[in-house]
Amino acid sequence: MFKRLKLITFLLLATFLIGCQQNSLNEDEKSRPVEVEGEDEQLSNELIDGGRNVRLYMDQITYHLPFDTIVFAMENKGSESITYGNEVYLDKFQDGVWVQIPYHSHFGFTMEAYELKPGEVVEQEVSVENFDDELTGGKYRIRKSIQLEEVEAVLAFEFRIEEVASSFFTGTIEEIVSDDLAIVLATLFENNPEGLVFVNLSVNEHVQFEVGDKVKVGFDGIVRESNPAQITTLSVELIEK
């Protein structure tokens, strides 16, 4: 059996809406990303415990900006029912830690509880317009809590958001600064002299880059002056070893 559920969005007014979660910030204040701590730092997308077997997954694991909604699903593959609500959260992997992307201060979830019976699948949608921050390229995850009798469990599924590059250049890796950062010697724009530029290698997790590799780099066309120069890396392709 397949069920579909769309998240309900509404305005939270302080004078009513009992039973709804809300952000404590005033409407004129901008929410800030919050670092995810403790057990929620490392999460699995599947829980297997006796007769319980629940899987959180996404059919689309790469989204290209711009887009309107993020779609995910939960499947109960076990022999026992589980309970879940409307709440769902989006985290981004930044500087080695997971950071929760805040919702608008006027956004909240209704507090219904739903039953997901054995063999059932439920699909949910998250609207991008409900977030307080503009989404950019990087590694993200959907984080969702479920209830197993008196115990709460948290599942998460990782995916990527990619921006479309408007400018490209080719160059040679001169130095690997860290696992995610390299210095590349390249000509950023036609007829310009060669120079050094920082390149974020983490946008391509499928290649182990080395010094001397020739790469093709995609970025948004904006170069920030420093030595080496800085760009927003959107893609890195290995051209030649």
Image (cartoon, helix red, strand yellow):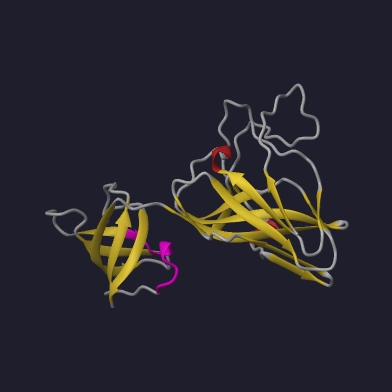
Residue for point 76% across, 35% down: 20
Image position of 237 with respect to 97: above or below:
below
In the picture as drawn, the residue positioned furthest to the bottom comes out as 241
Residue for point 80% across, 42% down: 112
Q: Does the magenta stretch include residue 179?
A: no
Q: The N terminus is located in which quarter?
A: bottom right
Count of numbered tags: 0
**Which residues, given as a range, are shown in magenta?**
198-207
Q: In the image, residue 70 lies at what x, y percent?
A: 57, 50
Image position of 240 with respect to 148: above or below:
below
Image position of 231 with respect to 81: above or below:
above
Q: Is residue 85 left or right of residue 34?
A: right
Q: Can residue 55 be seen in this view?
A: yes
Image position of 6 with respect to 115: above or below:
above
Find residue 157 and report its image quarter: bottom right
Q: In the image, residue 217 lies at what x, y percent?
A: 30, 61
In the picture as drawn, the residue positioned furthest to the top comes out as 15
Q: In the image, residue 29 lies at what x, y percent?
A: 57, 29
In the picture as drawn, the residue positioned furthest to the right comes out as 150
In the picture as drawn, the residue positioned furthest to the left comes out as 191
Residue for point 70% across, 34% down: 22
Q: The C terminus is located in which quarter?
A: bottom left
Q: In this view, does 175 lie to the left or right of 195?
A: right
Q: Is residue 96 visible?
A: no
Task: Using the image as rendered, state which of residue 181 and residue 63 is in the foreground.
Answer: 63
Residue for point 60% across, 50% down: 90
Q: In the image, residue 182 lies at what x, y percent?
A: 34, 65
